[in-house]
Image (cartoon, rainbow, N blue to C red):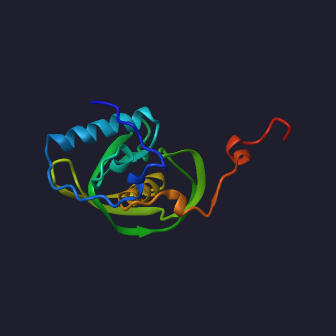
């Protein structure tokens, strides 16, 4: 495995539509493994292939909704699509490709995706809360969109730094 460079919002690749994955081979497996290492190193919760310069429909999301004592795990989504969404959540969102910037984004609270695994097998997965937010965020990357397009407003430096000692 190897760390990949995460491209930032200035890179034009982030605004391009990704092509479907058609070959489920060692090259794809290496990409997914590298993306997982890069995601963990960056302390993120999701990463899409275009964020590491690859225009393919592949994303990783860390499932954080696990029972106490269980390990969080990576969900690999190849050629994902959202097939159901319900509820609503509004909260702060950021992106590894937009470092240091956060904004308020409205997302569904529950999202079901249909995708292929690293071997090409189709499956469905339902996520809620942060996982649902990540599914939406990462799949939007595959169509060349950043979360900043959906922000109701960006958070200010004061909001990000929290209350001052004088408050």
Quadrant in which residue 5 is drawn:
top left
Res. 71 in view:
no
Left or right, 159 with respect to 93, comes to right
Give percent across and percent down for residue 16.
Answer: 36, 59
- How many numbered badges does the structure rendering display? 0
Residue at position x 44%, y 69% in the image: 86
The residue lying furthest to the right in this view is: 166
Res. 12 in view:
yes
Quadrant of the snapshot with the N terminus: top left
Residue at position x 33%, y 48% in the image: 49
- For the residue pair 99 and 92, the one nearer the viewer reads as 99
Quadrant of the snapshot with the C terminus: top right
Q: Is residue 42 above or below residue 21?
A: above
Residue at position x 79%, y 39% in the image: 164
Left or right, 73 with respect to 78, comes to right
Q: Is residue 144 above or below residue 118?
A: below
Give percent across and percent down for residue 94.
Answer: 53, 49
Residue at position x 37%, y 62% in the image: 143
Quadrant in which residue 89 is drawn:
bottom right
Quadrant in which residue 140 is drawn:
bottom left
Give percent across and percent down for residue 63.
Answer: 39, 46
Left or right, 160 with respect to 26, comes to right
């Amino acid at each position: 495995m190897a760390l990949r460079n995460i491209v930032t919002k200035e890179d034009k690749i982030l605004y391009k539509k990704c092509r479907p994955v058609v070959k489920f081979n060692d090259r794809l497996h290496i990409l997914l493994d590298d993306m997982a290492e890069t995601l963990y190193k960056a302390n993120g919760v999701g990463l899409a292939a275009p964020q590491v310069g690859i225009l393919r429909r592949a994303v990783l999301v860390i499932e954080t909704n696990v029972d106490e004592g269980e390990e969080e795990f990576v969900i690999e989504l190849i050629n994902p699509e959202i097939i159901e969404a319900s509820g609503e959540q509004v909260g702060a969102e950021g992106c590894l490709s937009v470092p240091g910037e956060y904004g308020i984004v409205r997302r569904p609270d529950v999202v079901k995706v249909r995708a292929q695994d690293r071997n090409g097998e189709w499956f469905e997965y339902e996520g809620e809360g942060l996982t649902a937010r990540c599914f939406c965020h990462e799949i939007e990357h595959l169509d060349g969109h950043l979360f900043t397009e959906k922000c109701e407003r960006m958070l200010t430096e004061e909001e990000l730094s929290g209350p001052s000692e004088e408050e």
